[in-house]
Amino acid sequence: MDRIEPRQDAAPVTVVVIGYDDAAHVADAVRSALAQGPAVGEVIAVDDCSTDGSGALLDALAARDPRLTVVRRTTNSGGCGTPRNDGIARVSSPYLMFLDSDDVLPLGAVDALLGAAVQHRADVASGLCVRRELPSGREVEWQPELYAKASVVARPARRPRLVRDTLCVNKLYRTDFLREHGVRFPDGRFVYEDFVFTARVLAAGPRLALVPDRVYVWHVRRAADRLSLSLDRAAIDNWQARLDAHRQAVDTFLDASQKRLARAARAHFLDHSLRMYARELGLRDAEYRAQWWKRTRAYLATFDTADFEAAPAPGRVAGRLVLAADEPRDLPRLKEFAARPARLLPPYARAPDGTPVWAADLPRVDLEHLRYRPMRLLPVCVDAVLRPRAHGTRLGLRLHELYGRVADAGPRAVDVELVDRHSGEVVQRRTARWTALDERGRDERDLWSASVALDLAGLGRAGTWDIRLRLRFADGSHRDTTPHAVAHPGVLRRSAVPSLRAGVLLVQPYATHSGALAVRTASGLRGAASVVRRKVSRLLH
């Protein structure tokens, strides 16, 4: 496809929208781009050979707004990179940005990014992306630490944390910058094309402007009939694609002599990708787990000691465990340690010299950092059992010792919060004191217990509720964590609780993918049917 040179007299920004068989959402995406106002001179919608009528829908929109140009591919590319490259070739504006067909740009996004790019003469302007879970509407900010305040970064190497934001869609690019440096996406079916594209951008040394504004809404549809390429993680091919993309990103930094960025990318891999997939290993079959372990070991063998040391402790330890063991092992403990926040389940082993280690037969995986890490970062473990009853619900908690650190701090109290997962609202807050236990001859300082009354019947409605804990100690320190769900038979059992508001409230304690205790509620017969539907949906997806 012939490249079109940017015209300086053109409206400043082109938005490239890509889509494939997404007639249900593409119109909303295009409208959100056109609604940005006069700063958007053109919207290029690249249809990747759709068969569901998306092309005709786009043509109808183009007939009503001359700013919209529809590009029809005659063959499906299999990924997101090729249609975006097609869009880059067609751009005639000084600046461009990308939008996926199932997402939207919030009002004011282009003005915020363009204003920062022009004011600071930046090659790239970047803002806050929000992940919106649908249909619940729950929102989670993506890499919010990067966008806490407006700033200018003269060179990416001065802020290595930039490698953590691997998205291409929450950014505005100077068109000539991309073309002068030959920055393109990988073509064809390349699942994590953002990783490579963003690495190529950063390796070219752009001047960046960061803004705290919301500039992109990423819609996450986990119950969709067809999951997005990045969400479809059930097959080992997805993990291999992630490894390949990450390897290319690191090689891009190294080829550009950007060693600090390469190290930061490897540290981020340990802290983000490795932990995320490790939490899900329990959902996979034995063949997947064996392949995952083998391929991950091979990739981690290319990391050096400094790469591991640059990563936060949970990812660093998880990576060393994979390298130290020939085959998958300790997966329940690995899942909990990879959680956010991390939890280290017993047993707590020591090497012959007294050094804390992951297991007695894995002394290379040392946990020496647990001796001096501040309490607010320690992976303490609190076992939890929720027992709904007609006369009231009790949450039983047991706090484990951790190489003497918990006893030294002096457990005093625990604050328990029940949080609406949809809104993030704290709906109940309780406090209880810890009591030291002397169980089966153990040292009395090994365990502490607490019991908290929760009013689940008072909720009176269907929902999903997370449990958050703040452990408070006599030395003034504290640790925020989540409780480990004890999964003994009969403990995670659905119960019916009388409710003045709902008549009958169905209560289902359950363990999340990372092993934390949470609870679902459903009111009446309709609520019971809703619980069944959600369970079937999870099994299918």
Image: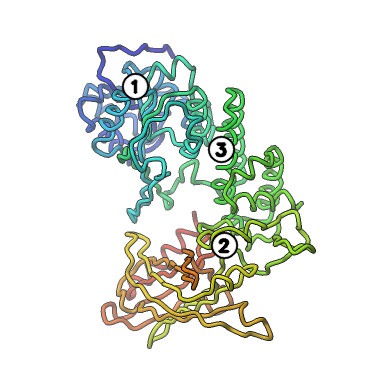
Local secondary structure at mark 2: loop
Residue 190 in sight from this viewpoint: yes
Say the numbered circle drawn on residue 484.
Answer: none
Q: Label 1 belongs to which residue?
A: 121
The picture places residue 406, in percent across and down from the top left corner, at 57, 70
How would you rate the neighbour count of disc 1 (Cα within 10 Å): few for under 14, some for 14-19, many for 20 or more? some
Q: Label 2 belongs to which residue?
A: 379
Answer with mark 2 or mark 3, whichever residue precedes in sequence: 3
Local secondary structure at mark 1: loop
The CA distance from mark 1 to mark 3 is: 26 Å
How would you rate the neighbour count of disc 3 (Cα within 10 Å): few for under 14, some for 14-19, many for 20 or more? many
Q: How many marks?
A: 3
Q: Is residue 466 left or right of residue 423?
A: right
Circles 1 and 3 in contact, beta carbons < 8 Å: no
On screen, 260 above or below 143? above
Which residue appears at 32% of the width and 69% of the height?
427
The picture places residue 517, in percent across and down from the top left corner, at 49, 69
Which residue appears at 65% of the width and 68% of the height?
403
- Give the residue type at disc 1: Arg
- Give the residue type at disc 2: Pro
Which residue appears at 44% of the width and 36% of the height?
167
On screen, 197 above or below 289? above
Q: Label 3 belongs to which residue?
A: 264
Answer with mark 2 or mark 1, whichever residue precedes in sequence: 1
On screen, 88 above or below 322? above
Q: Quadrant of residue 114?
A: top left
Q: Is residue 257 left or right of residue 224?
A: right
Looking at the image, which is closer to me, 184 or 171?
A: 171
